Image (tube, grey):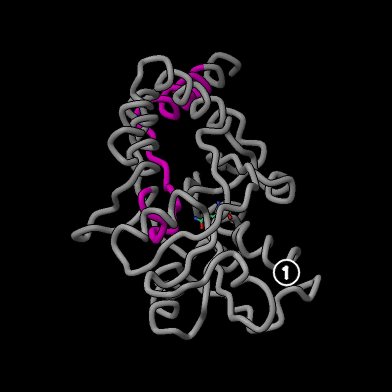
Amino acid sequence: MKKILFVAFVLLTVGFLFGAKYIVGVSADFPPFESVENGEFVGFDIDLIKAIGEEMGFEVEIRDMSFDSLIAALVSGNLDIVISGMTITQERAEVVSFSKPYWTADQSVVVREDSDFNVTVLFGKRNVGVQTGTTGDLWVEENLVETKILTGDFKRYDTYVLAMTDLINKNIDAIVLDAPVAEGFAKVRPVKVVAILKTYEDYGIAVNKGNKTLLALINEGIERLEASGKLDELNLKHF
Ligand code: GLN
C-alpha cells in the first residue's frame, strides 16, 4: 500500500512539474506589459510568463479580465497565476502570494496632448479618472479625495482604454496610472505625461496563497531568466 502511494505521489509530482498547464490571468489593457494586437496577447508580462514556463517546464493559457477581478479569480481557483503589472501591496499579499519583484514603477499624471495642464490638474474642481482597484485608484482616493484636494468628479473605469477615450473626449481632465504604461499610451494616443508621483511600486507575479510549489517554480524561473540575460532581452524588446 505504501509503495502504491509513493508511486502515485511521484507520478503526480512529475505530472505537475512536466507538461502542466496553468491558466494565467491578465487585464490586457496595460501596454507594453499586456495588450491585444491582431487578436493575440502581447507584451512584456506575456513574454515573461511564457519564458518562465519554457524554462521550468509548464505551458500557459492566457485569460483576459478586468483588473479588479483578477485576485478574486485567483482566490476562487479560476486562475492559477496572475501577471498584470500588479503591484505587490500588503493588502493583496494577505490574500495571495507574490513572486520576487520583476519590475519597479511609479504613478504618473496623464492629460490631453493639446492641454496646458500640469500637476495642478489634480487640485480643485477637476475630473480625474483611474482604473478600478489599482494602486492609482488608491493613491487618488487617499491623497486627493479623502483630503478634499480634489473636489471634482473622481471616475473609476473598468479599463484604461475606456479612461483614455473619456480623457480624449474631454469628459475627464487627467488619469493617474503607472508611469511606464502612461508613456506607452502617450506614443499611440493624443495624450502626454505631465508629472511622476514617486510611489516606488514593485510588480510581482501572484499565485494562490499557500501554493508554494508553483511560487518556487516561478521564482526559480525569474532567477534563471535574470542570470541568462533573457530578462534584459525582454526589457529591450518592450521598452
Ligand atoms: N500596478 C498597478 C496596480 O497593481 C496597476 C496595474 C494594472 O492596472 N494592470 O494596481
Q: Is residue 48 above or below residue 46?
A: above
For residue 98, above or below residue 89? above
The spot of residue 118 in percent (x, y) is 54, 66
Which of 82 and 29 lies nearest the eye of the viewer?
29
Question: In front: 84, or 233?
Answer: 233
- According to the picture, the residue beneath numbered tag 1 turns out to be 144
Q: Farthest residue to the front: give it.
A: 116
What amino acid type should be assigned to the residue bearing mark 1? Answer: Leu
Q: Position of residue 155 (x, y in %)?
A: 58, 78
Residue 30 in which image quadrant: bottom left
Q: Is residue 72 magenta?
A: no
Left or right: where 57 falls relative to 9: left
Q: Position of residue 138 (x, y in %)?
A: 68, 62
Q: From the viewer's side, name the closer residue of 7 and 190.
A: 190
Q: Which residues are magenta?
A: 7-32
Q: Is residue 173 above or below residue 66?
A: below
Q: Assess disc 1: are there few (<14), some (14-19) or many (≥20) residues with their C-alpha within 10 Å of its C-alpha.
A: some
Residue located at (45% from left, 67% from top) = 160
- Quadrant hosting ligand 1: bottom right
Give the position of the N terminus as an image quadrant.
top right
Q: Is residue 9 left or right of residue 14?
A: right
Identify which residue is drawn at 36% across, 42% down. 44
The residue shown at (52%, 19%) is 4
